[in-house]
Amino acid sequence: MCRREDGVLRYAPLCIHSFRLIAPRRLLDAQMFNRQYHSYEEIRSVPDRLRWCRHHMGLMQKEAAERIGISRGMYMDFEAGYVDYYPKEIVDRLAALYQVPPTDFLDAYNLFLYNGQGRQIREYRMRLGMDKKPFADMLHVDVSSLRTWESDRKRMTKHTWERCFKDRVCS
């Protein structure tokens, strides 16, 4: 800032304050979202937790997607809740970006996968003292499917997990 005083030009430093922007591109959406939840701890759904974190970093979906190395469409699907499966690598990158524990972005099914489905299935089968064939019969699945799940060669679908393991104790 400058001003003329007694014919002399006087300069004064201008203070510029910076603050974190907590507003996405669509302000109305953010206002409605912030009315729904007053704190991060209240949020139970993964898509809403992702949206909350992104809003509080002042990022657009495109920017968040670029920072974790995925497409905007994929990120939008995560926030919209269109996906059942969140890959471990992406969950870890999201957690690092938003500085929260990875488990914050995992529902029960994805937590099962994140913690190692093969190990958990094997441990559960061993606790029951069963071989693969009788265990597969008990679950009403092919023994070949059980082998691929236990060796982590194939991911169990959410539908199968709900049918076979949702209400059973796996660590």
Image (tube, helix red, strand yellow):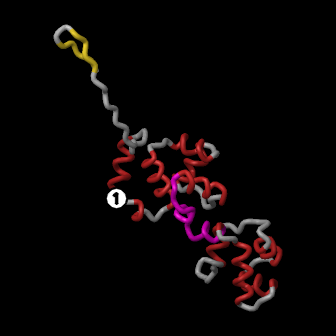
**Viewer-nearest residue: 139 or 79:** 79
- For the N terminus, the quadrant is top left
Q: Is residue 100 covered in magenta?
A: yes
Q: Position of residue 33 (x, y in %)?
A: 38, 52
Q: Residue at x 61, y 47 (%)?
A: 68
Q: Position of residue 129 (x, y in %)?
A: 75, 91
Q: Quadrant of residue 94?
A: bottom right
Q: What residue is disc 1 on?
A: 38
- For the C terminus, the quadrant is bottom right
Q: Residue at x 63, y 43 (%)?
A: 71
Q: Give the magenta-colored segment's residue range.
A: 98-113
Q: Position of residue 168 (x, y in %)?
A: 61, 83
On the picture, is 73 further left or further right than 20? right
On the picture, is 166 further left or further right than 42? right
Q: Is 135 above or below relative to 17?
A: below
Q: Is 66 above or below relative to 85?
A: above
On the picture, is 38 further left or further right than 112? left
The extreme top residue here reads 7
Q: Amino acid at mark 1?
A: His
Secondary structure mostly seen in the magenta stretch: helix
Q: Is 67 above or below relative to 110?
A: above
Q: Quadrant of residue 143?
A: bottom right
The extreme bottom residue here reads 129
Q: Is residue 60 covered in magenta?
A: no
Element on which disc 1 rests: loop
The extreme left residue here reads 6
**Viewer-nearest residue: 4 or 116:** 4
Q: Residue at x 66, y 56 (%)?
A: 89
Q: Residue at x 39, y 42 (%)?
A: 21
